[in-house]
Image (tube, rainbow, N blue to C red):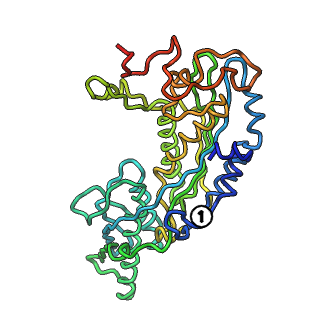
Amino acid sequence: MDELAEACAIDPVELRLRNDTPVDPHSGRPFSSRNLAACLRLGAERFGWAERDRLRARRGDRHRLVGLGVAASTFPQYRFPSRATVHADPHGRYVVRIAAADVGTGARTVLAQIAADALRVPADRVTAELGDSAYPSASWAGRSSGTTSWGTAVVRACEALRAEIGRRGGEVPPGGVEVSWDTSDELAPPRACSQHAFGAQFAEVTVDRATREVRVPRLLGVFAVGRVINPATVRSQLVGGMVMGVSMALCEEGVLDPAHGHFLTRDLAAYRVATYADVPRVDAVCVEEEDFHTSPMGAKGAGEIGIVGTAAAIANAVHHATGHRFRELPLTPQRLVEVMGPSVRPGPPGAPPACGTPPPCGTPPPSGALPRPGSPEQP
């Protein structure tokens, strides 16, 4: 997309906005909701995108190059059949049980909030119990589907419980009332709409002129993930996803030994992952929207969408800084040396380096460049 924007002499954000569509080009179905344009506009405003070239010139110097990049993100929405049980006692307390797995995403907190909203009671009167195979079966925790799949079952069970208590004249017997619900029938028909989460990531990078090290001092993600049930847990998911995207862009690499076929990067001593020090300033915000096609709460999944687009935004920012396109990740100093050459003549602040035309694919690394781990040149 950025190469097309460059060829058309159009700003990369503007090109994406001009080609926005309400219809899924793969299926031909309309999107249930699509606020990608809002993500791009809000992100561009917050990130200072209009000052992109001026920021590059002002922040660059004889020691480092500076670039800004953007990428759009999308992730399909999944809902899998699940079952949930809700129990009400005569004292106005409720217990939700579902055999879901809270893997650190805050599912227990969010499902209690969803149940409280469906029951129309304060959240402190609801307890969510998860993680026990004796509870009603639930789908797995993956594909950003936990909240939409489990939440749908919880909402339907709570609605059924309210109806049952209504039939009893609003009275709850001493033993309480319990209702279960299975969403298999609800999720069986084909979808009428294409359901996706959307986002836009903006990255600022610096490239050291001498060492070719890429750093990401600033990262912003703006996302359309439906109704945000819990802002704290959603932000944590999105920020964590973006840090994973930085890992993909800069350091994560599975290297195979060409002689023996095993992985050289088979533990955390050799396989590098990004940490807090690699992203000094990262932020995630959400635009306001609700999508009741995707779930009865109006929420979408908010896990992987934070990862999608981050590496592309960083790679586009590196191109903006250096004038070179990179076709492989991660963007290690060695890879930049292979494409840009080992030395750079100092230029004016913010200007791309004057280092000639990139070598064609397959050209051996320049003299003095270190061989990549696992390459035939490495002992």
Residue placed most toward the observer, 43 or 171 = 43
Residue 148 placement: quadrant: bottom left
Q: Is residue 340 left or right of residue 188?
A: right
Identify the amino acid type marked 1: Glu
Q: Residue at x 73, y 26 (%)?
A: 350
Q: Height in image: 245 above or below 267?
A: below
Q: Is residue 123 left or right of residue 231?
A: left
Residue placed most toward the observer, 126 or 33 = 33
Which residue lies under the disc numbered 1?
Answer: 289
Q: Position of residue 311 (x, y in %)?
A: 53, 39
Q: Position of residue 251 (x, y in %)?
A: 47, 30
Q: Is residue 79 left or right of residue 287?
A: left
Residue with the most extreme top position: 368
Residue 312 placement: quadrant: top right
Q: Position of residue 364 (x, y in %)?
A: 48, 20
Q: Residue at x 41, y 31 (%)?
A: 253
Q: Position of residue 21 (x, y in %)?
A: 62, 63
Residue with the most extreme left position: 134
Q: Secondary structure at mark 1?
A: loop
Quarter placement of the C terminus: top left
